[in-house]
Amino acid sequence: MGMGGGICQPALAVRTDACKVSNMNNAPTLYWFRADLRLADNPALTAAMARGAPLACVYVLDDGPRRPMGGASRWWLHHSLAALDAALRAHGNRLWLFRGDPASLLPALAGHLDAGLVVWNRRYGKPGRDLDAALKAELKAAGRTVETFNAALLREPWEVRTTTGTPMKVFTPFWRAARALGPFAPPLPAPAALPPAPPALPGAVPLEALGLLPVKPDWAGGLRATWQPGEAGAQARLTEFLEGGLSGYAELRDRPDRDNTSRLSPYLAFGEIGPRQIVQAADLLESSGTARFSPADNAKFQSELGWREFAHHLFFEQFDMATKGINPKFDAFPWIRDEAALAAWQKGRTGYPIVDAGMRQLWQTGIMHNRVRMVVASFLIKHLQIDWREGERWFWDTLVDADPANNAASWQWVAGCGADAAPYYRIFNPMLQGVKFDPNGDYVRTFVPELARMPAEHIHAPWEAPAAVLARAGVSLGKTYPRPMVDHAMARTRAMEAYASLA
């Protein structure tokens, strides 16, 4: 990006929001990183850079009353912050880390710097919006300029509305309307260099002092083996997916035994990559004529980005989606409290192989295939009749891509109490789901090794296998692998009766 005396260049006229800031004085700029841990396509950083003044980049681990991160997300954050600091240093700056309440820390830092400008990228849940609005008012009252930007979404929540101006509650018309607004804004380039950082900031702490990594025990070995957090890791994963996994995506995205999902969700959750970057990269490759994927693959993939947008638009309207159903009809649902059953589900010891494979994949790698997420969620809610909020909390703690909008919206979708939700009576049959989407049993064998020698025709219902088949596979039901903890037909009948009681 070119600069001339702080004046936005004509080539960037489509992104005037990143060029609101003048270059009239040299008072330092304070940039507050949140879920936007990248340099490229970062409009707040672009605005700070364009001003040319010394730049203090800070991240605050929020100890306020807002929902704390889960363990897997904290692990990711540690490595993402380390990667961001290295990237900033390579560009002539650095990252300053703090722990505490931003409501008091940010004004204090701005005062210490005598900052002429404070910038950040917007967030959309109400608690975060309220904090940001209060901070903005306080900083402006102190005579400081504050500018905020959109780095997280293709369309902001107030941009996509019904014809009467109300929020949209059904995905298909929402995505159609979002696309109809015109081309998505192109991503901004990464800076070639950044202004210098201040020599010191009071109260800054080293990364290790944030206490983000698990100790005693260190359970993150599988995460380390699976992921490369950070902006460089995000770009590497995007390239790998566009050159391989996106081919056949429209048909194969539901197959957990295949590598046809993007696995970009944690990078999006931490803002190490933005949706504009993903859309542009996919569209440019498709238009180049060298893509291995079809237009249908690209369209289906981008509609999945649309589901992420939809969840954030819902979150904008209802910030407490993790605890309160959008459809109040389900408030009176007769949930069963069963700690032993919940623990068996969490540990992947339900006796249903596709469910157990998914739960063990989650624990080992911090992620789960999207189709399997629906299966395991349906099992918890409808087979065990355990409150969907228990599942949402477990995913929040164990997913590296835990996102307050996507996680809650997805659990509500399966439970039937969300916007545009699957009806409650859509009860996944875990055996049939396994046969359909893991036909050879490869996914189950990967994460449930005690069934590795089971033949494909029996691997998704080992309790139905002849004794000789079990013996050859080294499987002893109830010993080496559990029997089903609940009968599918009985559970389905019980779930339907519970649902009928709401009428």
Image (cartoon, helix red, strand yellow):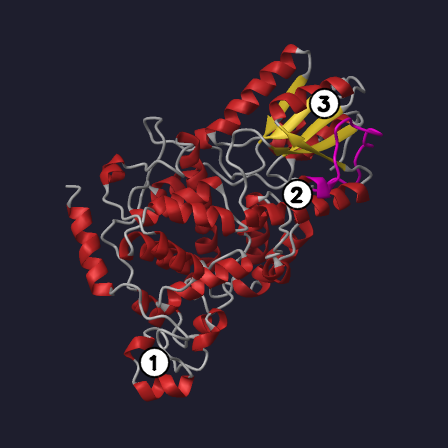
Provide the residue designation for mark 2.
Answer: 211
Q: Which is more toward the observer, 231 or 158?
A: 231
Measured Cα–Cα span from mark 3 to mark 2: 22 Å
Q: Nearer the viewer, mark 3 or mark 2?
A: 2
Q: Residues within 10 Å of mark 2 (few under 14, many from 20)?
A: few
Q: Earlier in the sequence, mark 3 or mark 2?
A: 3
Provide the residue designation for mark 1.
Answer: 457
Magenta extent: 189-209
Identify the amino acid type marked 2: Gly
Residue 46, image x and y in percent? Answer: 70, 33
What secondary structure prevails in the magenta region? loop
Residue 377, image x and y in percent? Answer: 36, 54
Q: Which is more toward the observer, 188 or 461?
A: 461
Q: Secondary structure at mark 1?
A: loop
Provide the residue designation for mark 3.
Answer: 109
Measured Cα–Cα span from mark 1 to mark 3: 63 Å
Q: Secondary structure at mark 3?
A: helix
Asked whether disc 2 touches disc 1, contact meaning CB atoms under 8 Å apart, the reply is: no
Farthest residue, direction right: 199
